[in-house]
């Protein structure tokens, strides 16, 4: 079931899964170790056939596999023509050596193809190389990219040389219509793209035919499959590279609907949510043992290009894991970069609104990597009103590079696929898959796929479970850390806030047992001593965890021995057991999060490569998930220690301690509004959904009582200390 807690053996296996994935690739990249030479396709034997060369640059790697297969199909199946093709991932152009190889390849090419070139400095590099060679090239195909790159297009007499300029009538018209109609305009353009080539072919003008060829090429590119790209390459060879026809066998584009609901086992892509639900509930659900009447539903947003190119293994893997946990799945996509359209059309209006949503594109909801409309995204997501997880596919790194990196995610990817989605309201940037270094195909990362599925189901079950049955864990901390201030936080009355929330929870039907009537009573129940330090005998002990219980339930307990010795250790321990401090009230546990463990140097954990949390810290979070069975964790106040535990900066792996400790538990964090930088750390490293609280207004308090009089005497002495009569008397008064 979705609420189950994985066994320790499965957790240990998941941790080791990451180490079993092997990828390869040369050292040709600068921020990525992949090598463009791995993508070069040469005919084994030309046999007197005409040979043309194609160079392509793409943002993501899913087209690499399709282009490779398409080129090999041409070399194996065409009698009159063969092809050499080589592809570059956009980020690889940062490497000076790779950039020089790129210039050499373009100089020798017949055709250049570029797509989704939206990084300014890299767009400039592409223009620098292709622009001087544009007239020499037989054709240049640029699909959605920055205007300077789009102006490189050359298909016979068809160009986009005036794109983005004020005198471009078409450009101004498109800009105006986009402002008027928003996402509907993008959909209209796709419909136009499908129909206009059929009209243009009847026009005699060469320009019209060249425009038709460009639009046909765009259709083939959007189709994305090896068969579509093979037809694209042959069409361009027939029309623009050679004077004579090299083949008469060019298939029409085979396209998926621009907007649809997809499932790997469905007979087709559905364009109507009701039809999909009918198929799923009557055929798919019984097949996998799901009761559609009681099962939660997880909505998944996909990138159409992965479906087009048959590069959907990572999608299928997550779908299977979600269904294995007893949940329904509805996967939607669009051919545009405005994913708010399928969210509105299929999630909000489907009759079965998902209980949680995962965006697998890794991009902002509206605009993708190009031009974002965060206001529209926020409006759409607010209307949907569901937890919105934006999981991240590795784009600019291989698995090996990510695993070995202390930073984790590539900085460009953090900007595009973490920061921008966060502005929409996305949470939990968990890596779930990435490209294979040689083939370019996207491969799922098993332990990360499991984590995304577990967390999505935990969020979904919070909507379904009755309030009286929900178990909530509330964590409090000692701020400043290790200073004997248990239950305090920056600018927050922690116990007063918890007590207010507790009363509201009780009103809404949560089981809080014998919850104290006052905030002071709550504090006394947990602390006994209001000046108590973490680990003091004056804190209430809720649970004593034996060493055997701890080692069985915590899959990484043995790894902590190097830094802290064998359990139970000295912290949060009575010498025999590990102590969990706090107090349980019905289905709500209020616990004292353990300290960092390094007295006087709490930040050591964040910056030390070999550090780890102590046994007491691991036992506390193990208790929350596996003994108490928390449906969610609520942390009150800035800040805690979980988010500062050792691990990568962004893009946690299964060996990063924030990831291990929070594991599958939803984490809601009440954080001071004046500290967004550390709140961001909490969001990205401990998967926290932060809720801001205002800092209290402050003014100069001044002095009072005896201090005020003392201050006046000191001021008087400053002016009269040279006075032999008054000076000594003031000193005596002080």
Image (spheres, helix red, strand yellow):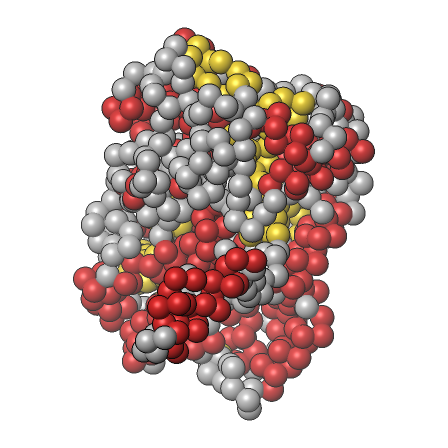
What quarter of the picture does the N terminus occupy?
Answer: top right
Residue 178 position (above or below residue 187):
below
Q: Nearer the viewer, residue 720 or 681?
A: 720
What quarter of the picture does the C terminus occupy?
Answer: bottom left
Direction from residue 457 to residue 581 in the image, left or right = left
x then y, percent, for residue 420: 52, 58
Q: Nearer the viewer, residue 520 or 586?
A: 520
Direction from residue 329 to residue 60 in the image, left or right = left
Q: Which of the 4 image quadrants contains residue 51?
A: bottom left
Residue 724 position (above or below residue 113):
below
x then y, percent, for residue 191: 67, 63
x then y, percent, for residue 549: 45, 11
x 66%, y 73%: residue: 178
Farthest bottom residue? Answer: 167
Count the numbered circles shown. Answer: 0
Residue 378 position (above or below residue 205):
above
x 27%, y 40%: residue: 608
Farthest front residue? Answer: 725
x then y, percent, for residue 358: 59, 42
Q: Which of the 4 image quadrants contains residue 393?
A: top left
Res 30 seen here: yes
Q: Nearer the viewer, residue 665 or 424?
A: 665
Res 421 seen here: no
x 54%, y 33%: residue: 530
């Amino acid at each position: 079931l979705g609420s189950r807690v994985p066994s320790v053996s499965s957790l240990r296996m998941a941790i080791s899964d990451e180490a079993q994935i092997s990828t390869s690739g040369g050292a040709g990249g600068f921020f990525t170790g992949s090598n463009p030479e791995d993508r070069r396709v040469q005919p084994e034997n030309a046999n007197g056939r005409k040979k043309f060369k194609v160079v392509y640059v793409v943002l993501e790697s899913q087209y690499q596999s399709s282009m490779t297969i398409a080129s090999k199909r041409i070399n194996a199946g065409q009698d009159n023509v063969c092809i050499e093709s080589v592809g570059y991932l956009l980020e690889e152009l940062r490497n000076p050596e790779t950039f020089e190889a790129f210039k050499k390849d373009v100089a020798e090419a017949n055709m250049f193809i570029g797509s989704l070139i939206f990084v300014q400095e890299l767009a400039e590099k592409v223009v620098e190389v292709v622009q001087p060679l544009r007239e020499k090239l037989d054709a240049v195909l640029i699909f959605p990219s920055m205007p300077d790159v789009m102006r490189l297009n050359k298909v016979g007499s068809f160009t986009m040389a005036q794109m983005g300029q004020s005198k471009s009538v078409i450009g101004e018209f498109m800009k105006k219509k986009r402002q008027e109609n928003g996402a509907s305009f993008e959909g209209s353009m796709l419909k136009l793209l499908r129909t206009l080539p059929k009209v243009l072919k009847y026009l005699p003008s060469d320009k019209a035919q060249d425009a038709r060829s460009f639009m046909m090429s765009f259709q083939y590119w959007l189709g994305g499959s090896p068969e579509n790209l093979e037809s694209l390459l042959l069409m361009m060879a027939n029309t623009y590279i050679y004077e004579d026809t090299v083949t008469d066998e060019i298939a029409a584009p085979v396209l998926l609907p621009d907007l649809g609901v997809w499932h790997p086992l469905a007979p087709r892509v559905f364009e109507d949510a009701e039809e999909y639900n009918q198929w799923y509930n009557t055929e798919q659900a019984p097949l996998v043992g799901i009761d559609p009447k009681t099962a939660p539903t997880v909505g998944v947003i996909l990138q159409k290009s992965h479906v087009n190119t048959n590069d959907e293994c990572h999608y299928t893997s997550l779908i299977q894991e979600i269904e294995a946990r007893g949940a329904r799945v509805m996967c939607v996509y669009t051919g545009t970069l405005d994913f708010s359209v399928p969210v509105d059309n299929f999630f909000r209006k489907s009759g079965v609104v998902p209980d949680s949503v995962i965006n697998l594109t890794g991009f902002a909801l509206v605009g993708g990597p190009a031009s974002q409309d965060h206001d529209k995204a926020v409006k759409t997501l607010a209307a949907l009103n569901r937890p919105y997880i934006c999981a991240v596919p590795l784009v600019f790194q291989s698995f090996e590079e990510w695993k070995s990196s202390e930073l984790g995610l590539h900085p460009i990817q953090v900007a595009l696929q973490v920061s921008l989605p966060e502005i929409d309201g996305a949470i939990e940037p968990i890596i779930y898959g990435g490209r294979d270094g040689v083939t370019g195909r996207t491969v799922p990362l098993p332990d990360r796929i499991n984590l995304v599925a577990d967390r999505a189901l935990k969020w979904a079950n919070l909507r379904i479970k009755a309030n009286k049955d929900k178990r909530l864990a509330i964590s409090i901390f000692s701020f400043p850390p290790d200073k004997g201030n248990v239950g305090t936080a920056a600018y927050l009355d922690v116990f007063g806030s918890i007590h207010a929330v507790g009363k509201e929870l009780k009103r809404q039907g949560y089981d809080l047992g014998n919850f104290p009537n006052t905030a002071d009573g709550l504090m006394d129940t947990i602390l006994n001593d209001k000046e108590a330090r973490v680990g003091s005998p004056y804190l209430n002990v809720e649970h004593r965890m034996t060493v055997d219980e701890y080692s069985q339930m915590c899959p990484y307990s043995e790894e902590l021995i190097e830094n802290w010795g064998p359990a139970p250790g000295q912290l949060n321990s009575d010498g025999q057991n590990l102590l969990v401090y706090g107090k349980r009230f019905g289905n709500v546990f209020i616990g004292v999060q353990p300290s960092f463990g390094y007295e006087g140097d709490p930040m050591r954990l964040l910056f030390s490569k070999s550090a780890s949390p102590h046994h007491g810290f691991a036992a506390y979070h193990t208790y929350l998930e596996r003994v108490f069975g928390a449906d969610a964790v609520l942390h009150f106040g800035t800040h805690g220690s979980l988010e500062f535990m050792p691990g990568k900066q962004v893009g946690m792996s299964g060996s990063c301690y924030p990831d291990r400790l929070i594991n599958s538990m939803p984490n809601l964090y009440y954080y001071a509004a004046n500290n967004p930088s550390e709140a961001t750390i909490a969001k990205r490293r401990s998967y926290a959904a932060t809720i801001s609280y205002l800092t209290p207004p402050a003014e100069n308090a001044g002095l009072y009582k005896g201090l005020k009089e003392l201050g006046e005497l000191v001021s008087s002495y400053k002016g009269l200390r040279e006075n032999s009569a008054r000076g000594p008397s003031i000193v005596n008064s002080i």
